[in-house]
Image (tube, helix red, strand yellow):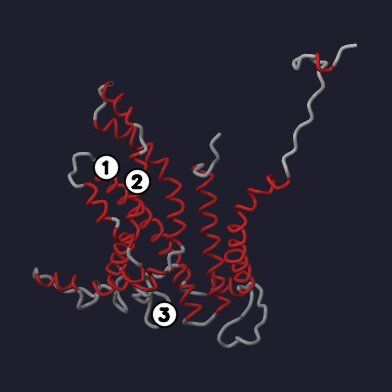
Amino acid sequence: MVSVSAIPSDDPRAPTPEPTRAPLQSKWKPYWYIAPVIISAVLFTIIPFLYTFYISFTNWGLFNFIEFDRVGLDNYRYLFQQSGEFLPVLRFTILFMVLTTLINVGFGLFLALMLNHPGIPERNLYRTLLIIPWALPFILLIQVWTGIFNNQGPINELLMSVGLDSQTWIPQLGDSLLPRSALFFVNLWFTYPFFMTVGLAALQSIPRDLYEVADLDGAGTWARFKDITVPFLVSATVPLLITQAAFQINNAGIIILFTAGLPAGAPGASWGKTDTLASYAYDVVFILRDYGLGAAYGVVTFVMIAVLIIVSSITTRSFAEVD
């Protein structure tokens, strides 16, 4: 009779060892780590959205504040079929999302490329100065920029000092070119430091060996930039492009505080030519006091953001897991 202990471990007659079971405490340990995030998401995102979704099917508002009724899809019918403001506001929302994303990301990466060049003296000083807009409070700086673009502000003073006419940058009525240009510029001021920092981090993570090998192969400056620098920058910034676009759709704060949606879309209109869906939803809730319609605008904005993120993530595979 052969002893079990005498049988080699690789012999087919050797008994199969029973798998060890992880303790119950270690099995649930990862979930305890992410529990605060899950609880926060449920309390501050999922429940408010479900409540907003429910309110969008009611006539809750200033005149139906205590007792309100469910009206089905009436708010959505009004939004898509009867309201004259939805399409122009939607068009500017898309324009605002596309232009601000391209301008902010492009300018931030341009500064990163400039500051990463070893031939620029005092690079660290410039990096510190250029990151200041990111460090100062938003609510303070937006008031400063409102004063700068005021009719008696420094920009008009500068224009008149060189013999040019002063401009009404944010008129009550009229053309939207100047207020939109000012809005894009101020939005760029607040956003570029983040993408400059991300670009610098991506550039400094590129292995120096790649550039040395390219030099040995006789590659020029453009070839090294196109074949080495750009692929690393793209892989680092494409996911940020998606999140930046989604953020700009929902970026109502800068519009409310800087332009207030002005100029008005028409005399007596409740919407403005610098309004996006998010900023106009704010006006519907806090000025018109139509909570049901404002909730419908909020749901439509959420659907736009969700579709943008899902479609972009699938097409670019930006958030795919790496094997």
Which circle, 2 or 3, is nearer the viewer?
A: 2
| Label 3: how many Cα within 10 Å (few below 14, some 14–19, many 20+) | few
Q: Secondary structure at mark 3?
A: loop
Residue 34: mark: none
Q: Secondary structure at mark 1?
A: loop
Disc 3 marks which residue?
Answer: 269
Q: Secondary structure at mark 2?
A: helix
Q: Amino acid at mark 2?
A: Gly
Question: x%, y% of residue 170?
Answer: 29, 74
Disc 2 marks which residue?
Answer: 199
Q: Amino acid at mark 3?
A: Ala
Disc 1 marks which residue?
Answer: 116
Task: Work out whether mark 1 precedes mark 3 in sequence or the reverse, and give the earlier one.
Answer: 1
Q: Between marks 2 and 1, how big is the CA–CA gap?
A: 9 Å
Task: Work out whether mark 2 precedes mark 1 in sequence or the reverse, and give the earlier one.
Answer: 1
Question: x%, y% of residue 141?
Answer: 31, 69
Task: Work out whether mark 2 precedes mark 3 in sequence or the reverse, and give the earlier one.
Answer: 2
Above or below — where is 68 with respect to 95? Answer: below
Question: x%, y% of residue 148?
Answer: 23, 72
